[in-house]
Image: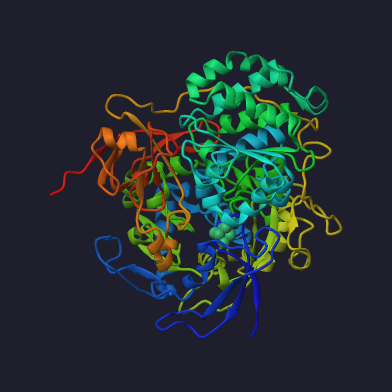
């Protein structure tokens, strides 16, 4: 019996698991593997329901086992049929050639994902710039982590979600969690919060819903969605007025505080209470705990960040952490909890529209020079930055927009904001190519569908929410005609005459990635597969093989020009949409425990769908009564973009002016607002105006 040590395919915690061979299930296609939790540092033997059932994906009867193409090329109303790789690739190459000849290089693009291994994310970014010579690439992490990443980059000089190991959370005496619900999103991580609480730590959760995380906390602050920034500035106001600012830290290790101090003058607690709904007493208590009950941490997640002012909101909490002198001290600091499996690595290696590997900027001449050298091309050949994810999707099939799109590891027909519009745009493409393991809602729209290997069928690395680079190890061969994305991209590059620049061997890609990242912010130069094996993963930055890696960042300085962290003055702005007479409530979206992202995988796992069979619209019993709704009724949620029908779930733990819907099912994102954050280009998933009505029984 050969045991394979690897990691869960889902979220950014990347729990350690063991895969053990066993006879395949009847009717299954895969190798048959049993899964057990491992004692890896982030999960210590724990797994959530998603992780426990992840092996079911491998031999799932709905696995795609062969490429699919439309029976009549160019006619999406014709059914998909099985095809050879040769035929599928020929259709793609033909469409790329025609599109680039008639509409220019940027008319062909790619949409990547935060679930791709580092090797695949790196190769996809390089493929678009070198094989397609196009600027049209972005990925679903733009919808996930981009606001917090933008704030951290401008303030701390670098974005590593948690700049300390997760185990440090257990040592913090005060933890402020803003828009984060790890009890549902990544349950094994709760052992660190629970350990802290058992030793007397106080946790304060900021969330419009009384989530499982909020229920276990010392305090739950329930602001109006979209007012988290005002709350943070209110806390900063109290810190300034009541002498809680760490003056030595501010003067010794930061710049720009005076502007922030002036800006928060206007956020006196009574006013902030009116803006946010959080009482003055709770606001004051929170700041005093953070300042006095130390070590202390501030952790944000998507609830605070997925707004049209998400970058500034994350910045406001970063400002607070800096003013209180929390950053760079033991068991202390600011962090953001990354969501997707390789959400961290996925944003470092070049699949963002404006980025080159090593977290380098595409418009930086020195970065272009370095990457041009590593890739063996003239830096002048590298395209300039392209459009961000939603901006690219919004223009699909229009003059000047992308006309041939490759989608990897994303189900944008479900996960993009205003998804009905995005589906319309996908339909307008000349050719849509989707690589996936199942026929996702996006794949069902495609002209060509490519069956890809999944987590236990290929080698590679992932970078978890702590910046720990870990190995995903192969336990079985891919079934049927399934190929890895590295092989697909190499095959395509061969046919485009650029194959010499690519390899489909993960280890060779990683060796090149090490060179490409060397000297960058996310420096992997000293990380090898062997070190990852020996050390339970290696934390970047790790510039040399004799460097120990960096579990804790900012202890001596910040990677900014002057070595200091920067305060940035930020002001509250109302969400793009406020409730009005027609749409009187706030819609916010989020996760539930049994489903993951767009549900492509988890909606196909029986035990998970039994536990969470459908999305429920969560609303306060008072709001339900006002509209004659009772628990379990079908209700219509309607926003300015469309409508969705859901069953109601009445819960006194949610604000009476707010409706919550989980985003794992098709149709929910029809409702959400694509208004973009001006810095990060993050859509406003977490707050838009909605009306609710019971559906009259027929
Ligand atoms: Fe997998 Fe995340 Fe669950 Fe861990 S917490 S088992 S990584 S989904």
Q: Is residue 358 above or below residue 45?
A: above
The residue lying at 78 percent from left, 39 percent from top is 554
* Image coords of residue 474 (percent x, y): 61, 74
Whether residue 586 can be seen here: yes
The residue lying at 65 percent from left, 20 percent from top is 238
Left or right position of 447 against 189: left
Q: Is residue 530 above or below residue 652?
A: below
Depth order, front residue of 587/97: 587
* Image coords of residue 27 (percent x, y): 39, 82
Depth order, front residue of 693/471: 693
Depth order, front residue of 594/125: 594
Left or right position of 224 against 157: left
Q: Quadrant of ligand 1?
A: bottom right
Q: Is residue 244 above or below residue 468?
A: above
Depth order, front residue of 586/169: 169
* Image coords of residue 86 (percent x, y): 43, 74
Which quarter of the figure has residue 587?
top left
């Amino acid at each position: 019996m050969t045991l394979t040590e690897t990691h869960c395919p889902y979220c950014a915690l990347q729990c350690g698991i063991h895969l053990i061979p066993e006879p395949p299930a009847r009717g299954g296609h895969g190798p048959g593997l049993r899964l057990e939790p491992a004692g890896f540092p982030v999960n210590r033997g724990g797994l959530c329901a998603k992780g426990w059932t992840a092996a079911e994906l491998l031999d799932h009867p709905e696995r795609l086992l062969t490429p699919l193409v439309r029976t009549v090329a160019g006619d999406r109303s014709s059914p998909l049929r099985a095809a050879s790789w040769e035929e599928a690739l020929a259709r793609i190459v033909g469409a790329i050639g025609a599109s680039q000849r008639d509409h220019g290089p940027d008319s062909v693009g790619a949409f990547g994902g935060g679930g791709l291994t580092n090797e695949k994310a790196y190769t996809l970014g390089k493929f678009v710039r070198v094989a397609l010579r196009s600027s049209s690439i972005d990925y679903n992490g733009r919808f996930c982590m981009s606001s917090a990443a933008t704030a951290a980059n401008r303030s701390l000089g670098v974005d590593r979600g948690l700049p300390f190991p997760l185990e440090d959370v257990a040592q913090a005496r005060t933890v402020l969690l803003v828009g984060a619900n790890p009890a549902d999103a990544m349950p094994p991580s709760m052992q660190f919060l629970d350990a802290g609480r058992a030793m007397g730590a106080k946790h304060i959760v900021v969330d419009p819903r009384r989530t499982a995380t909020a229920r276990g906390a010392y305090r739950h602050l329930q602001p109006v969605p979209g007012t988290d920034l005002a709350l943070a500035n209110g806390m900063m106001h109290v810190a300034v007025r009541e002498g809680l600012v760490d003056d030595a830290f501010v003067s010794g290790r930061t710049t720009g505080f005076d502007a922030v101090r002036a800006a928060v003058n206007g956020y006196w607690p009574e006013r902030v209470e009116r803006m946010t709904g959080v009482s003055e007493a709770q606001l004051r208590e929170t700041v005093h705990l953070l300042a006095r009950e130390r070590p202390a941490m501030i952790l944000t997640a998507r609830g605070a960040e997925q707004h049209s002012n998400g970058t500034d909101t994350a910045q406001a909490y970063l400002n607070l952490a800096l003013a209180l002198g929390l950053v760079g001290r033991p068991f202390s600091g600011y962090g953001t909890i990354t969501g997707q499996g390789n959400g961290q690595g996925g944003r470092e290696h070049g699949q963002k529209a404006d980025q080159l590997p090593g977290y380098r900027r595409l418009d930086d001449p020195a970065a272009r020079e370095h990457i041009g050298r590593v890739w063996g091309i003239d830096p002048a050949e590298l395209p300039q930055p392209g459009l961000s994810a939603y901006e690219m999707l919004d223009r699909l099939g229009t003059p000047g927009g992308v006309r041939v799109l490759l989608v990897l590891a994303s189900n944008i027909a479900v996960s993009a904001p205003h998804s009905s519009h995005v589906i319309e745009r996908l339909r307008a493409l000349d050719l849509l190519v989707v690589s996936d393991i199942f026929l996702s809602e996006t794949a069902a729209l495609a002209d060509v569908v490519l069956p890809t290997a999944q987590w236990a069928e290929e080698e590679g690395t992932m970078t978890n929410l702590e910046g720990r680079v870990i190995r995903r190890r192969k336990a079985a061969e891919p079934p049927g005609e399934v190929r890895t994305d590295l092989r697909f991209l190499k095959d395509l590059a061969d046919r485009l005459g650029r194959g010499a620049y690519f390899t489909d061997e993960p280890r060779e890609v990683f060796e090149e990635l090490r060179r490409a990242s060397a000297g960058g912010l996310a420096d992997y130069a000293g990380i090898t597969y062997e070190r990852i094996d020996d050390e339970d993963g290696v934390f970047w930055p790790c510039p040399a093989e004799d460097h120990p890696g960096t579990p804790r960042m900012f202890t001596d300085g910040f990677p900014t020009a002057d070595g200091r962290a920067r305060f940035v003055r930020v002001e509250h702005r109302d969400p793009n949409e406020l409730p009005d007479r027609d749409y009187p409530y706030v819609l916010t979206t989020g996760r539930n425990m049994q489903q993951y992202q767009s549900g492509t995988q988890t909606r196909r796992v029986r035990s998970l769908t039994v536990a969470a069979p459908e999305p429920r619209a969560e609303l306060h019993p008072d709001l339900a009564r006002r509209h004659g709704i009772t628990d379990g009724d079908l209700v219509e949620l309607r926003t300015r973009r469309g409508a969705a029908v859901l069953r109601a779930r009445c819960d006194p733990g949610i604000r009476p002016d707010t409706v919550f819907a989980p985003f794992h099912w098709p149709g929910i994102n029809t409702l959400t607002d694509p208004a973009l954050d001006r810095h990060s280009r993050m859509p406003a998933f977490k707050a838009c105006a909605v009306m609710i009505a019971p559906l009259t029984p027929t």
